[in-house]
Amino acid sequence: MPDLPLPKNNKGIAILGLLVSFLALGLKYAAYAASGSVALYADAVETIINVVAAAGGLWALSIAERPADHNHTYGHYKAEYLSAVAEGTLVVVTAFIIGREAVEGWLHPMPLLPPWRGLALNAAATVLNLGWGMVMLRAGRARRSPALVAGGQHVLSDVWTGVALVAGVALIPVTGWARLDSVMAGLVAVNVLRVGWEVMRESIAGLMDQAPGRETLEQIQDIIAANGEGAIEAHDIRTRIVGAMTFLDFHLVVPGSMSVNQAHDICDRIEAALRAHMGSTLVHIHVEPDNLAKHEGIVFWPRPTPPAVANSKHSA
């Protein structure tokens, strides 16, 4: 899919997401009204939650983009995680509502109206969600926004639900089995419950300041190692990622005879490199003299003598 021109701030993307949710809701409700299908009704109910979640995501992003103040000196980035947790909770509640409708439809199956018009409308909403969900997920990952990623995952879950519903409901007139409608609604409920759990799990990990993955940690270590020339070692590296902001602190050991200005220059060089590669990054570096070296972490100096040089000296 080609890259679409998107608003520069995340709040603008959230506004577009809210408009898309309203449009998808209109299509899905029209699909239910045209068919009387319990499964399509369940899909429309889930989309109501999408609208509420999109509004919540917009609110959270508005809070998260506020600058740091005297009450929130580290910024408001975690508001995105609160939105994602709330969205996950709403999704789980939706799953139980849909499940109840599925049970009711199984116990008291109702004959469907001709479903073809309803299926066409639902398919249109599914295509809309597919396009927008991919846009949100890509933008959320590129901008490291938990709220956008959670919203994108939620919208894409609707896509697979929509595909299954169109296929399943289309089989009802062919098979003549009215309860297939309720079975499809039950499968929707299970899928929605799964997505809600995943969204909540990832968001709670962020609220608990879980360390990023090994790949990110290795990238940070490589950046420090490549830009710490003049220092002896860097140890006790700790990091956490909150929304679009990376928080990082570590101890940097320098020679005891090094001036404050020289040590400060090394710190500036490392910080600039980290921000260039990681984006918005808040770095705290605790400078220590060489007698506090732990001989672990990232060792800059003394560098090991290359084997070729060592052999030549030995032969001499």
Image (cartoon, rainbow, N blue to C red):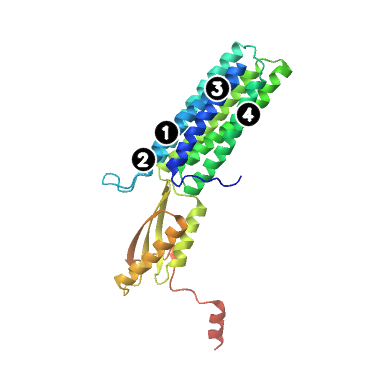
- The alpha-carbon separation of the residues under discs 4 and 1 comes to 26 Å
- Residue sitting farthest toward the front: 5
Residue at 38% x, 68% y: name it.
Answer: 266
Badge 2, how many Cα within 10 Å: few under 14, some, many 20+?
some
Say what secondary structure mark 2 lies in: helix
The disc at residue 40 is none
Image quadrant occupied by the C terminus: bottom right
Q: Secondary structure at mark 1?
A: helix
Q: Residue at x 64, y 28 (%)?
A: 164
Please tell me which of labels 3 and 1 falls first in the chain. Answer: 3
Q: Amino acid at mark 1?
A: Gly
Mark 3 = which residue? 29
Crowding around mark 4 (Cα neighbors within 10 Å: few <14, some 14 to 19, many 20+) is many
The residue indicated by pointer 4 is: 123
Q: Quadrant of residue 156?
A: top right
Report which residue position mark 2 lands on: 63
The reply to whether callout 2 and callout 4 are in contact (CB within 8 Å) is no
Residue 305 showing in the rendered view: yes
* 208 horizontally vs 168: left or right: left
